[in-house]
Image (cartoon, grey):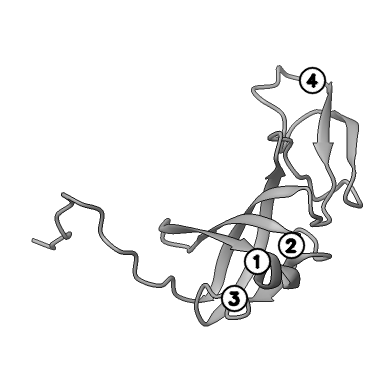
Amino acid sequence: MAHFKLVVSDRTGKSTSKEIKDISAQPLLGSKLGDILDSSVIGVGAGKMKITGGSDKSGTPMRADVHGGVKKYVLLSRGVGMKNPLEGARIRKLVRGNLITDEIYQLNCLLVEGKLPDQPEKEGEKPATNV
């Protein structure tokens, strides 16, 4: 069964992490990077969220320009999966396709509509006050 770590962030930079399993993860299977989903189906809050990225259990990143749910070696010059390329450098790297399958471990999402639910405070943390 599917098991995802879902990281949802909003436009202000705040993010929340949630683990979803089995039945609650079913709406995500088969969708692609860039798809906009209803966030209430997953239980993040009311609104819409866009899938922006992710990785599998071994840390292989997903790329939107590689089709399917497979791992492939592709020739990269920049973008996801490429670190500090020299000018004009191209390197063959292992990346995963844009389709969400059972092998995906982490999904990164952006909240397009709505707001994040309030996060509980950690022990010893003072609430933020505006001066």
Question: Spatial distance from mark 1 to mark 2, Cα to Cα?
Answer: 6 Å
**Disc 3 target residue:** 39
Amino acid carrying mark 4 in the image:
Gly
- Tell me what residue is drawn at x 30 percent, y 64 percent: 120
Query: Where residue 11 sits: x, y (%)?
Result: 47, 63
107 in relation to 116, above or below: above
What is the spatial separation of the Cα atoms under label 4 and label 3, in whole angstroms?
A: 40 Å
Quarter containing the N terminus: bottom right
Tell whether label 2 touches label 1 (CB within 8 Å). Answer: yes
How far apart marks 4 and 2 lie (CA) works out to 28 Å
10 Å crowding of disc 2: few (<14), some (14-19), many (20+): some
Q: Which mark is residue 88?
A: 4
The residue lying toward the viewer, choosing from 73 and 103, is: 103
Residue identifier under label 2: 34
Label 4: few (<14), some or many (≥20) within 10 Å?
A: few
* Residue 12, quarter of picture: bottom left
User: How far is mark 3 from mark 1, CA to CA?
Assistant: 9 Å
x then y, percent, for residue 75: 88, 28
Callout 1, which amino acid?
Lys
What amino acid is labelled 3 in the image?
A: Ser
Q: Give the mark toward the camera: 4 or 2.
A: 2
Lower position in the chain sequence, tag 4 or tag 2: 2
In three-dimensional space, the C-alpha distance between marks 1 and 4, rounded to whole angstroms, equals 32 Å
